[in-house]
Each structure stands twice: as C-alpha cells, then as structure tokens.
Amino acid sequence: MFFIATRIKTVTVSLISLLLISCSLLEESSTSNISNFNIQDSNGRAIVFDNHPNKMIVYDAAAIEILLAMGEGDRIIGTHQFVQLPANSPSITRVGDAFNVNYEKIVDLNPDLFFVFYETFTADLENLGIKVLYLNSLDTDLEDIRAHIKIWGIVTGNIQAANNLVDTFDNQLNHISDQLPNSLTKPVVYYHTFDYWTPGGDTLIGSIFELVNTNMVSQGLSGYTQISLEELVSKNPDFIFTDKWGFDQITSENALQSIKAIKNNQVYVLKNGSLSVASHNILLTIEELTNLIYK
Amino acid sequence: MDNKSVLKITDITCYLDDTKVLDNISLDIKPGTFNGLIGVNGSGKTSLINTINGLIKPAFGSLEIDDFRLNNYSDKDLAKLIATVPQNPTKMFGFSCLDIVLMGRNPYLSTGEWPSNNDIEIANHSMKSTGVEMFSQRTLDSLSGGEMQRVFIAKGLTQGTKILLLDEPIANLDLSYQIQIMDILLSLVKDRKITIIAALHDINLASLYCNNIIVIDKGSIVKNGSSKEIMEQDFIRNIFGDRLSMIRIPIDNRNIIIPKSIK
Amino acid sequence: MQQLNTYRIYTLLIVILLVSIVLSLSIGSVIIYPHDIIRSLLTAIPIFNYQTDIPDSVIIIINQIRLPRILLAGLVGFAIALSGATFQAIFKNPLADPYLIGAASGSALGATIVLMIIGPMVLLHISILPLASFIGGVLAVGVTVIIAFSSRSLNSNTLILSGIAVGALANALTSFIIISTNPDVRPLLGWLLGSFNTSNWDKVLVIIPYLIISTILLFNFRRVMNIIQSSDSEAKLVGVDIKKTKYILIILGTLLTSVAVSVSGIIGFVGLVAPHTVRLLWGYDYRYLIPFSALLGAILLILADSIGRTILYPQELPVGVITAFIGVPFFIFLIVRGRRTFYG
C-alpha cells in the first residue's frame, strides 16, 4: 500500500546530502564531465556510479515524466505497468506491477540501473547483480520535487536540462502564486478518496493545498487516514476534490447534502496531471486547482 | 396363542467398507422378551444393533416390525418404534439430565416446538423407572458411571418405543451396578411390556435375566434359544474352549460358566 | 446446571443494548444530550410534524450519520454473533467461526468481484452487494461441503479442513483481483479491515429482511441444535435428519455472514467472543445461547465502533482493529484459564 505509507522524510535528508556531494563536485559546468559520483540512497548507503547509465529501468511514474521532459527518455528501457505515458511517446517495456516484478525480464533487459521509490524489491534485485537506486519519495513536498529533478541531472549528466526544468518549474509556480488572491478567509477544501480516506497536512497533497492558500479539512491529520463524516459536516468545505472512484460516493451520500461544496456543485475530479505523481507536471494540477477555486 | 414376532429379520447381509460384517442373519424376536446378544468383540453385535435401528443399510435382506418393512420409515417414525442406547453415549457437557432425557421426545416434536408438560411428565416417569429422577437438574459429569448409564436408558425409554436396543450397557460397571441395571431392564420388560435386545459380554448374567439368548460369531448367528438351550455343556465348550467349565447351581436350577482352576 | 432466570437476562441484555445505543448516539464530534437526540429523532417522523430550533447540523449528525451507523453496527453484530453460534453448533466446536468454512472469505470475494467489475457505481445499486456476497459465500461453502462430502462423511474435521483450504483460495483470489485491477488499493480497503464509516440508511434497510428471515428460522432450530451436540448417529436415532439440518444451518449461517460482510467488510472476533461469553455466563443450551449471543454481539459491535470513531477523532479507527484488541486478550485469558469450557 505504497500510497498510504507513513511520513518519514528520509528523502529530504538524503537529498540534502546529495546536494552537498554534488555541490562539491560541480563547478559551473552545463554538462558534467564527472562521471564518477555517489548518490546516497534512502537507507543511507552510497550508490557508486562510474558512468552515466544508459539503460535504466525506472519504476516510478514521476521519474519517467521528469526524464522525458529533460529529453533523456532514450535512457529508459523499462518501467511498471501502471505508468501512463504521454500520447506520442514511444512505448516502454513493462516489467511488473506494484507488488511483483518479473525478475527474468529484468535480467534479460540487462539494465545498468534500477530506480525505485520503495524497498520491496531492492534486495532481490541486488542479489541478481543489478544496481539499484532506492529513493523513498512516498511523501514528498515541492522542495523534494526540485531535488528529485536535480538528481536526474546528475545521474544522466544533463545538468543543464535539469536546471532548466527546475527553473521552469519555479517560474510557473511563482506565476501561479502571484495570481492567488490575498484574502483573509481561506477556502476550506476536502480531498476525497474512496471510503473517506484522505491525505493529511504532511503529505504532498497537503502541501499543495497549503500552497494554493486553502485550509484542508484534514490539516491536522498525518498521512492517509479515514475521516469521520461528522467532521466533514462540521468543517463544511467549500470545495471537494476527488478522483473518479470517489465522485459517486461523495455526491450521493445523504448525510453530506448540506455541505456547501455539494450544495453548490463544487465537487471536481481533477483532469490534468495527478496529485499523486510527484513530478513537475504537478503544476498542471495546481493550475487547475487555482482556476477552479478562484475563478 | 398367537405369538407373532415384533421384529422379523430375514436374511440380512451387511457390509462396512468392503468387509462383510453380517452374513445372512435371520431372527424372529417375540414381543415382551428380554433378548441377550452374546458374542466376542468384532463378532457383529454392534453391526446387528445398528442395522436394526437403521444406522447401517443392509445390502441384502429385510427388516420388519409388525409386518411393515423398516426401510420405508423416515428417521423420525423409526425413532418412535426403536430406541437405542449406544455403547458410548456422548456425555454432553453443560446440559442437565432432564434436558438429555427430554431429547428422547424429539420424534414427537416438530422442529420449532419445545417439549410440553406432557413430554416432561414422560421424561420424569422414565427417570423414575431407572431410578435417576433425583438427578433431574444435575449435569452428567457429576454422576457415576452407573448413574449416567441409567440416565441414558431413561432417554431411550422416553422415546416410547416398542423396542429398546442396548449396546453393552453394563460393560464398564461394577458388578453391583451391573446387576442393578439388569434388574431395571428386566422390570421394564415385565412392567412396560417392551422388547429389549441387549448386547452383553457376560453370558452368566445374560442367561440369568434373558428369555432368549442369541449367540453371534463372525457375523453369523451360531445359536438362538433359551438360556437352558444355550447353557449346555457341548455348545459352551465349542464356543469358549477348554479353559472354562460349566457348573450347576442346584438352588436356582441353572448353569453358570467359570474359569477352570489353574493347574 | 442451574436454572436461569431467562426473563431477567433478556431484560438485562436489552437494557444494556438500549443504553449502548443512547450512549453512542451522544458521542462523536460533539456531545449531543438525550433530550436533543429525542428531538432530532422526532423531526424525522413525518406524522408528528415536529418543529424545533436545534441546529440543522445536529439533526443531520443524529439522523443521517450516527443513527444509521449505530443501527448498522448493532444489526451486523447481531448477525455475526448469531452466525458464529450457529457454526459452533454445526461443528460442535466453540471455536468454529464463519471463517472456518470459507463463508466470510467467499462473501468478500463475491462482493469484491462485483465491486471491481461494476465499479463504485454499485453504491447506487446497494441491493446488489448482499446478493453478490451471499452468492460468493454460498459458492465457497458449497465447494467446501462438496469436498468434505466426497470423503463420505459430513463430519466436523473434514468440513473444517476443506473450509480452511477454500477460505485460503478465496482470500488469494480476492487479493489477486485487487492487485491486478487497480494499483490504488484504497477503494477496497474497507472490505479488508471492516468498517462502518460509510454506513447509511440504504445499508440498514437492505440487511433487515435477510436478518429477520434468518433469525426466525434459526430460532426454530435451537432445540435441534442441542440434539446435534451429541453425535450424528445419536441424533439420527432420535429422528433428526442430520443432513438436512446441517445444510439448512450452514445456509442460514452463511447468509448471515455474507450479508454482514457485504455492508461492512470482514469483522473478526465477535462471532467467537459473544457466544463464548454467553457460555461462560449462562451455559451451553442453544435455547438461550442463540438469542443471548445475538444481543451481546450487537452490544459489542456498537461499543467497538463507537470507540473506533471517537478515540482518535477525527480520524477513524476501523472497527476490526478494536474487535481484535478486545478479542486477542479475551482468548489469551481463556487459554490461560484452562480448557474447562470445552466439550468433553
């Protein structure tokens, strides 16, 4: 249940140490001539690279999006089943789903790096002689997304593209933030998933809603928890955002018909990007959110 | 005198798994008799009892009560004709003796029905007949072996049947309790006019109490007759071998079997 | 065994049940006192045309959130405890549980299949789920019985063994469906953990008819349930149709389990704790074991759910976690105390 993990921010620690390492290695070069570098994974181990990997299995939708945006898509030779690729991109071999990988297929593809954001397969893959980079990104915030992009810059050697992507990200983010109205009363929002599981204030979704100047009903909760209907009634959110699985449930619940969001038809399924993929594309979703809330 | 059979067993052959346990058995049981079924372990006593009461379906042959074929009866109706006290009745935990005896009234009750006062009367009466009416509210585990056995006999009586089958009713009891129960069974035959078939291992007791003794061996009837006919020198030596001798008790005018002295 | 004053016990249990209901109605995000509870309830009955100045939110909380939830918890607890007692009668084992012959797992599988195929739209067609659950439960139990029966006897051990196998298979299939259909398993989490968070009046109304029928029929079988505690042959010898009786009891027990699973997922321990407690207090006679277990089950689950929804407010702790917290120490206590409560 990797979407409902707990909130250990090891990635922040590891990313900070990564940045320290990379800062000491880099000197204003647009492409890195340094192909010897270490990256500290989320277990604190240093993963040694002596070249830039060309055949990577990237088991993470966010990382795929980042690499494609950086133009480094050619290095990807495999990913997992539920990654959705943009319309005109070439297909990528699928080597498994959330709970199982096809080890034979992986060995057959002979990757020089397997990137993953949770630990289930790391030991087995390493036993098969595959280099694994494990960076826990189950609960990232926006700062982590930036660091994530920069890591790929180092790994691929294409620091320029990474920096460009980060700059674009920052610019667009600032643009969005500037456009936010200054109001003393923040709109109240609820993010609904099936059976009233909702992300707490310390999740990525939580940080996004904070960024767009709203108060989440589940602000005080940590991680993913089930919330009480009474709390929804009493907090009376102005907006409800959900996914396709939750829409029917939340709109048809008799007890909640008096909530402002439902009475005023402010229940939305987000169309652009996804609030659960921690890549630069999250901006699309943030933009959609601000449009819906502050139109 | 019209001495019609109450139970007619004709050419019964039975198999358990692939073993033949009863071989061409025929019996004519007269009403109001105390029948003792004698045989060693594995001779077929239990199989015969379980065939009569319908637990085992015979491969060949027929059983009739009062001229009606037994295989036409439902379990419930059969239970109104034949009651069985099995060899090791389940000692049900947590139920009072009265509760257990009342289970014998099941054939007369529909599924959702609880025993009426009449049923309770009948149960009490049965418990009186076997001398356990004072244990009505006690649980089985507080009773001795003999007392428990009498409770189960009372349960069988409560079924109100013509025929009562008992499988080794006195096997594990002290001699005084053995006699006590045999006395009770005899009085049931005399007072209630029921027919009893009891598998017994003690031929002396059987010959003392029973009108009729059926000797069974390896699934076949070896001999069937009165105690006098059975307790006969040559026959006994055939069955029991040379380690036993038969002696005569002049006072009672009957024979008993005792082990021969050790040389 | 001592004569029970059964009227007193019925009264005691019903009073505790009512107190639990009132208590549960009053706690939550806000404490609502009995006089406001009654006023809220009255506004819901159109005949009275009751007017009051209690805030709307209070009325909604009582009538739309707490009341259906508490009733559902009570009805489900009633059903599960009743089902547990029934299976214990069939298997002559106080540790028998609807899980043991695959009933609960099969029900969950049935509901999972329907949910995954039709999708959350099924919420609007709530009446499908109990049916799907029941079909799943009956199929699972049917397979169990067929396997056991092919060993020529419908005795306890073979039933339990094949039930464990079938249950394991159903669990594996359920997991497989969840994994292959959707990477985001959250939609199905409710089933696995058992929860009353999404209770509503539809669910309550859906299970009531099944509950009424099963309860009435089971009540009729209490005397026969006592008789089959001896042995199959002894029961047959007093005229009980063992096969028919066991089939009917299995079907009724499975129906109760699957209806419960379809509205609230798999909730453990209640089916064991309630009948066991009744045995400890009031004996083994199914005449009383059946109704007392059912009432106690309702009470337990109402209280467990109330704890689950208030202890970490506004976060909901699934009721299955609470019942495990109650159930595990209970069983440790039983084990330590000794085996005197078992048969024989």
Image (tube, coloured by chain):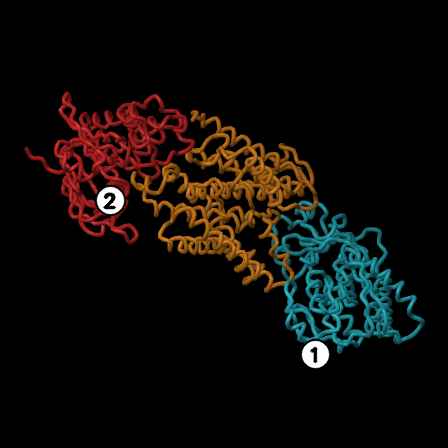
Looking at the image, can residue B193 be seen?
A: no
Spot occupied by residue A165 in the image (x, y as percentages of width and height): 84, 71
Q: Amino acid at mark 2?
A: Thr
Task: Say which quadrant the N terminus of chain A sits in.
Answer: bottom right
Q: Colour of chain B?
A: red
Is B21 or C237 nearer to us in this picture? B21
**Residue C263 higher or lower than B176, as above or below:** below
Q: Chain of mark 2?
A: B
Quadrant location of the C terminus of chain A in the rendered image: bottom right
Image coords of residue A6 (percent x, y): 73, 53
Please check whether the numbered discs 2 and 1 fall on a single chain: no
Q: Which residue is mark 1?
A: A90
Cβ atoms at labels 2 and 1 below 8 Å apart: no
Tell me residue C90's x, y (percent): 41, 43
Check disc 2 and report the residue beneath it. Answer: B51
In this rendering, position of residue C150 left or right of residue C310? left
Colour for chain C in the figure: orange
